[in-house]
Image: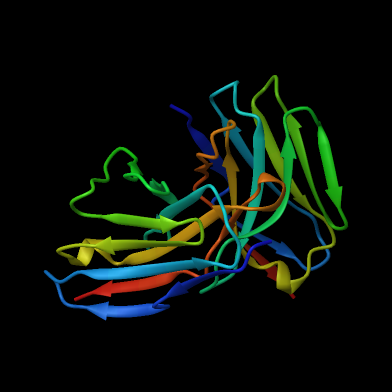
Amino acid sequence: GENVEQHPSTLSVQEGDSAVIKCTYSDSASNYFPWYKQELGKRPQLIIDIRSNVGEKKDQRIAVTLNKTAKHFSLHITETQPEDSAVYFCAVAKGTYKYIFGTGTRLKVLA
Amino acid sequence: SAVISQKPSRDICQRGTSLTIQCQVDSQVTMMFWYRQQPGQSLTLIATANQGSEATYESGFVIDKFPISRPNLTFSTLTVSNMSPEDSSIYLCSVVGLREKLFFGSGTQLSVL
């Protein structure tokens, strides 16, 4: 079955710096790659996603890049702010809506 | 996105008892799922709740422990049966909503003593 690895598990950055989180997957048939942000005590919220026919997608300060050949995708957050502090999960799916989630990255933005 | 409500939001239960969690969606959805998030961990799919038929369980989860109902396209329940402290987790229902994206309910934080 699909295996999703996420790195790093924790990440601390200074406010205003960039943060990058990477996920690798094993099933080349996977075709949908969302990212979720989970603040303490709250539900995971979809923040950005990308499908396998696109290499990059951007939404203001966040972007996702996908390398299908290498089977990895990354979340990029620029100009980080304290409110970006949360746990971020990548996920992988292939059409059946069965999402396999990564292990999560705890991001701390230091003011 | 759909509004997904869960009840209760949290509960503290004694071992050996059962708890039923309700999930209500404000619109009809075809795909509905139940996830478990153990403390400090990722999200693990328990089962797909199928309307009008038995739920489809993932490896490691069984109907006797986690019976699921899905009487219509807006509602589902998950029961955690014969609870032990290892069942202490956040339980989340989720639906595939607008543009085929997955959205989560508000979650139920369960503590088993």
Q: Nearer the viewer, residue A78 or B5?
A: B5
In percent of width and height, residue A37 lies at 63, 60
- Quarter containing the N terminus of chain A: top left
**Image point (64%, 63%), residue name:** B2
A83 with respect to B45 (left or right): right
In percent of width and height, residue B7 lies at 41, 76
**Image point (57%, 61%), residue name:** A44
In percent of width and height, residue A66 lies at 74, 33
* Total labels drawn: 0
A25 with respect to B12 (left or right): right
Display coloring: rainbow
Residue furthest left as drawn: B16
**Image point (61%, 68%), residue name:** B3
In percent of width and height, residue A32 lies at 66, 36
Q: Which of A58 and B23 is in front in this view?
A: B23
Q: Nearer the viewer, residue B42 or A53?
A: A53
Figure check: B78 above or below A35: below
Figure check: B20 above or below A100: below
A15 with respect to B35 (left or right): right
- Quarter containing the C terminus of chain A: bottom right
Figure check: B69 above or below A91: below
Q: Nearer the viewer, residue A87 or B57?
A: B57
**Image point (59%, 67%), residue name:** B26
